[in-house]
Amino acid sequence: MPVLGWIVFTTILGGALSALAASVLLLFSSQRRIGLLPHLVSFATGALLGAAFLGLLPHALEGAGADSYHRIGATVLFGILLFFLLEKILLWRHCHNDDCEAHGPSDQHRASASGVMILVGDGIHNFLDGLLIAAAFLTDIHLGVVTAIAVIAHEIPQEVGDLAVLLNAGLQRGKAFTLNLLASLTSVLGGIIGWALLEQATELLPYVLAIAASSFLYIAVADLIPGLHRNVEARASLLQVLLIGAGVFVVAATHQAVH
């Protein structure tokens, strides 16, 4: 399969799977969903960290060459600061539960506005995910697969929270699912545009991979892990560590298997 085919296939699959999984999970009782989501978030944290440290950063450093290590480090730092600013303007804020403090205000007027904001933010985020997946596939098919797995792992709990916000904004379930799916599939457009822009600019790939790594690191450390810290029970904490480790393991094993 050509590289573009891999990009289109994985972005469509990721967008559709995450939106479908979110809809299925919202059929669960609130108590069961609340119990399940932290496990998904823990696994996603491990997958993102594993993809960043075991896949994206090594390939970025290898592609840039020994004389560019400092530039790669500076690019990662720039990316983290960029995503911090994006989150400040609510374009990168993720919901992982039914009551998101950023997007889930109580009154109907504000809830409706939050629904629009979350669609815009989710569309931008998924578009950028598509760009980063394209850069990974253009670097190495195996790296692309690993990156896509990490994105999908994170998208599922995110889409559950996003869909809950859309329903809270007063949308009917069918319309909320359709809009959520369309926002998820902006990753396909990002992937195609990324392929078109980067195919002839391979010298930029290491720096785009560094941005991808900073995105994964920021989401894991600033967005996901603080939510996991809210539960300090010993049993829950142990399970979180095990699931984070499982996420890292799946990424590492996939990276080895596809080679």
Image (tube, helix red, strand yellow):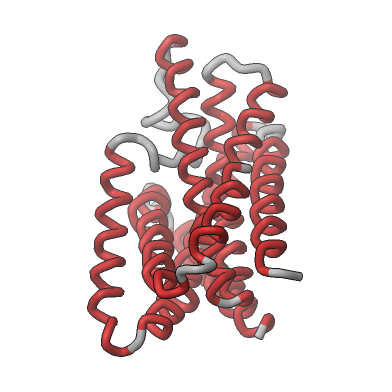
- The structure residue drawn at horizontal position 56% and vertical position 40%, both measured from the top left corner, is 34
Seen from the viewer's position, the closer of residues 220 and 74 is 74
Using the image, determine if residue 225 lies above or below residue 176: below
- In this rendering, does residue 137 appear at all? yes
Q: From the image, which quarter does the N terminus lie in?
A: bottom right
Seen from the viewer's position, the closer of residues 168 and 11 is 11
- The structure residue drawn at horizontal position 42% and vertical position 55%, both measured from the top left corner, is 233
Using the image, determine if residue 116 lies above or below residue 12: above
Using the image, determine if residue 36 lies above or below residue 161: below
- The structure residue drawn at horizontal position 53% and vertical position 72%, both measured from the top left corner, is 248
- In this rendering, does residue 43 appear at all? no
Quadrant housing residue 251: bottom right
Q: How many marks?
A: 0
User: In the rendered view, does 243 fall on the left or right side of 53?
Assistant: right
Q: From the image, which quarter does the C terminus lie in?
A: bottom right
Residue found at the far right of this picture: 1
Q: Residue 199, image x and y in percent?
A: 54, 67
Residue found at the far front of this picture: 200
Using the image, determine if residue 122 lies above or below residue 84: above
Q: Residue 170, image x and y in percent?
A: 57, 14
Quadrant housing residue 175: top right
User: In the rendered view, does 127 fall on the left or right side of 89?
Assistant: right
Q: Residue 185, image x and y in percent?
A: 63, 43
Seen from the viewer's position, the closer of residues 202 and 178 is 202
Quadrant housing residue 91: top left
